Structure formats: structure tokens, C-alpha cells
Image (cartoon, grey):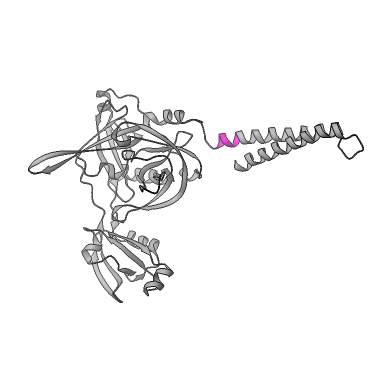
Amino acid sequence: MKKVMRNICIFAVFSAIMVSSFVLGMRLGAPGDGFVSQNEMEHIVGTLMAEIDRQNEEAVRAIAASGARYNNAADMFASIDDSVVSINVVQQQMTTGRTRDRHSAGSGVIFHETAERIYIATNYHVIQGADVVTISLDDIRMASASFVGGDQRSDLAVISVLRSSLAEAGIDNYQVATFGDSDAMEIGNFVLAVGNAYGEGKSATLGIVSALDNTITLDVGIVLNVMQTDAAINPGNSGGPLVNTAGEVIGINTARFFSAHSEGMGYAIPSNEAAVILQQILEGGNIVRPVLGVIFETITPQLRDLHNLPTTGVFINQVVRGYAAGNMGLLPGDIITHYDGIRVTDSDHARELIARTAVGGEIVVAVWRDGQEISLRGVMTSYLTSTTKF
């Protein structure tokens, strides 16, 4: 489509030049003086205008083929409004012998339904540890939700609400959202982030896709593949949808980058990846995955030469308590050179080896520490299981 639009501009400019030349030719020249005749010029201009019309028609067809249906943010919001819910979370904490309620907020999007329930996708971190969860479509009428399952590694979870509970609350304007193809998105495409920002009710922010196939590292070494957007994703937006101009969900909003020196860096889990995980959660509940409990980076040639380090491996930046790495004695500054006898080449390779390990299985890790290589043994742990009770 970019090529089509570029060609239209080229032909339009060229046509304008030729029309100007025609006017000048009529005034300054005559047949036989090296100028084209009026009939010849009219034929050239007519041909160019026909080409412009053809290119315009092609552009319209290309836009239609891209799935774009809405040309303004209001229509984009209206298309998804009845699929987005505000999530209110209550955690009951004991302090000085008394139970205290801790409130937090998030967002979700309806992605599946049965005869009895609707199912809502959200972020795992939104509902983790919850005792009570309620949802609302209009930020006034509330209905109680139940936990279906979640996957901490992908930061996705599913909650459900009985249709009867929705009816009792007077909520009837809900619909299942349509998931789009996140692989079809391009940098510069317009998107709308919708959610319960700061727990103050449903709102929307407009932006573009800023980057594709980025990775971010969350707590306990969770690495997410994400789409970056400059649409504002504020606290409370987590779990809500990122919507394209066809009104389709192409991402689940999950995080933002906060710094005094930057702005406009929000992240969403691509819909193609989210859809697979959400379906697995629907079918089997919680997904148990192995976690070593470290945050590491690849040893670069510069880092290797500077500190006289091994030629390959990963450098441990952080060790998270409660997981295999801490239990077996791994320390920040260690360099993992081998994992279960296999030489580690880089961070991606290390993550792949860890992902293959069965939870509860024995692991042997060789690390470079204080100028020598040592071997450590441990048992593979999993991501923290949900402590939700709702």
C-alpha cells in the first residue's frame, strides 16, 4: 500500500508539471518549435489522469483488504467498548491481628463465552493473590468473577463470570471481542489502548505501533515478547486490549516503561501469542513452567575481554529468592558456562535449556566464579503458583 500511495503522489506531481508545461507551451511556443501540440498534450494528460484514477482505485482496494473499518478513535472505541471490563481486586492481609483489605485495579477483555459463562482475558499480575474479584462494563454495575487459570511466564490469566450473575447485576450489553492478526501489524499503524486507567473507569488512549518483536524482562526473570506502542498504558490498563483500526484486539496491554527521561513506551503481548496461551488456560487451567530464578545477559566480546572471562556463557545480574538458583547457591556475578553438561552459548540458548527442564527434576550448573569453574546441583522450581481464592 505504501508503494501505491507513493506512486499516486509521483503521478500527481508529474501531472501538475505537465499541465504547467502545456499552459506555457500554448503561450510561448507553436507547432514545429519543439513544443508538443495541444492534441498531444491533451493525450498525455488524459493518460496520466487515467493512471491516477487507477492508482486511487488500487489504494482503496488495498485499504479495504487491510481490514481497516474505522477512521477515527471514537469508532474504534465503540467497536470494543462492550468487550472491555474494569477489574477490581481485593486482597485480604493480616496486620497487627486485624484483616485489612488491599484494593487494586486492572482491565480485561471478553474473548470466549459458553451457555453459562463469559471468559475474560487479563494479566496474571492483575489478579495474582486476589481474594475477591469483581468486574464491570460501565464502572457502576458489578458482578463477581471466578479464577479459571493463569500462566505467570506469559503474564496471562483467565477469569470467568456467570451469565446469571451478569443478569442479576443488570449487565446485558456485553460481547465477545474479535482477535486480529498481530503479525500483520506494521510500525506506524494506529492503535487504541482501552482499560481501567488508575482504577477510575474505562478510558482510551490513541497511538501508533512503535516497534515489533521487542523483549522486556519482568520480575523473577520473566521475559516477554511484546509490541511497543506510544499509546499511554497507565496503571490499571494492564490486561486491557490494544485495538487496531478494524476494531480487533491485536495485543493485551501489560506494562509501561517509566523513566524521567522517556515517555510513550508501553507494551502489549501480541494477540497471536496471547490467543494460544489463553486457549491452553481454558482447556487446562494453570500452566506450570520451570524457572531457574535468575536474570542474566549474554557475555559479549567486550565484556569477556574486559574481565578476562570465558568465551561463552551468560552473566548473572540478579538472583531471585525462593527459586532453584538461590536454593543451589548461584550468586550475582556468576557466569553460567554449562547447563546439565551442555555448554551455554548465549541468553536465548540458556532460556531454551531451562524451558526443557522438568519441574522437580535435578539440574547441574557449572559456573565461573573467582577465576575458577565450580559445579552446583539443585532441583528445578516452577513459577509461583497463584494464591488466588476467588
Residue placed furthest toward the left: 97
Q: Is residue 69 magenta?
A: yes
Circle count: 0
The image quadrant where one finds the C terminus is top left
**What residue is rendered at 28% in x and 22% in y?**
170
Taking the view exactly as shown, the residue that stands out farthest to the right is: 32
Q: Nearer the viewer, residue 73 or 354?
A: 73
Q: Residue furthest top?
A: 170
On the picture, is 105 further left or further right than 225? Answer: left
Q: Eyeballing the image, is 324 above or below 209?
A: below
Q: Quadrant of residue 138?
A: top left
Q: Position of residue 242 (x, y in %)?
A: 41, 39
Q: Is residue 125 visible?
A: yes
Rendered location of residue 339, percent (x, y):
32, 68
Q: Nearer the viewer, residue 353 or 63?
A: 63
Q: Tell whether position 240 is magenta.
A: no
* Observer-nearest of 226 and 349: 226
Please provide the residue range marked out in magenta: 61-72
**Quadrant location, the N terminus:** top right
Judge whether 244 appears above or below 379 on screen. above
Residue 216 in the image: x percent, y percent? 37, 52
Q: Quadrant of residue 48?
A: top right
User: Would residue 39 be seen by someone viewing this image from the given angle?
Assistant: no
**x, y (%) of residue 289?**
29, 54
Instruction: Answer left or right for 246 relative to 241.
Output: right
Name above or below for residue 200 compared with residue 226.
above
Q: Residue furthest bottom?
A: 372
Tell me: 230 left or right of 9. left
